[in-house]
Image (tube, rainbow, N blue to C red):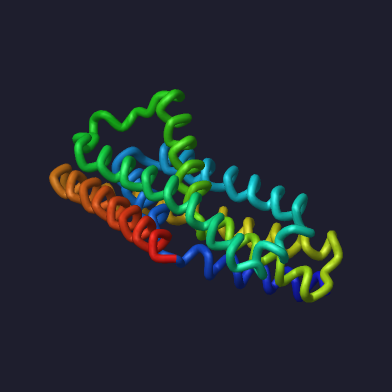
Amino acid sequence: MIWSALIEGMSYGLVLSVLVGPMFFTIVQVGIERGFKAGTALVAGQWISDFVYMGLVFWGASYIQVLVDDEAARNSFIFYMGIIGSVILVGFGVAMILKESVVRNQLKVKKSTLLGYGVQGFLLNTFNPTPLFFWMALMSSALTKGYSSNVSYVLFGSVMFVVIVTDILKVYLAKRIRTVLKDQYILYVRRLAGAVLIGFGLWLIIKVLTL
């Protein structure tokens, strides 16, 4: 059963890694504009958010199935998370568009800036309802299949292992892309990423208002 959970978790991890959402575009933008350290700080914030969610679903496993099955409770939760998430996405998107891009001779990143990128990654992941519901659905699946705690740890751990490896690869590739881009196009990438975040934020608020 452990091997089955390992393969299942790695498969889910690959699916989660290839999803194109707000974090994907932000990772690309930060990796291209600020380099590997800044991009890694951003995804580290996302990982911390995921680990927090994992802890919550393990701690509240008995309530997960109730929330999954109770449509009214689920919609209420999605509504409030969606409102907060949409505000954060639009806010970060507007900030990206208004701020000038970093040129090549300004790539050195301060520790306080790295911390800021970590906080940004944490907020973008935490207040986007999709990651939380992914972990909740995964726990619901583990409960349905009768996985023990140890097997569930393998399942969740293998998902995070794949996510971490692929996120680091995304940051590295984004950094490499920078070497072939002119500063002018790097600014376009920033504005495109900002517009995408605003688009996701508006889509999210429309989605939750029409529940």
**Image location (x, y in percent) of residue 188:** 18, 49
Frontmost residue, 179 versus 107: 107
For the image, the number of numbered tags is: 0
Frontmost residue, 143 versus 110: 143
Tell me if residue 161 comes above or below residue 35 in the rendering. below
Residue at left offset 52%, top offset 41%: 45
**Image location (x, y in percent) of residue 4:** 76, 75
Residue at left offset 48%, top offset 55%: 79
Tell me if residue 209 comes above or below residue 38 in the rendering. below
Frontmost residue, 143 versus 211: 211
**Image location (x, y in percent) of residue 121:** 46, 43
Q: Is residue 70 left or right of residue 163?
A: right
Frontmost residue, 4 versus 96: 96
Q: In this view, does 176 lie to the left or right of 150?
A: left
Q: Is residue 184 left or right of residue 176?
A: left
Within the image, what quadrant is residue 173 found in? bottom left
| The N terminus: image quadrant | bottom right
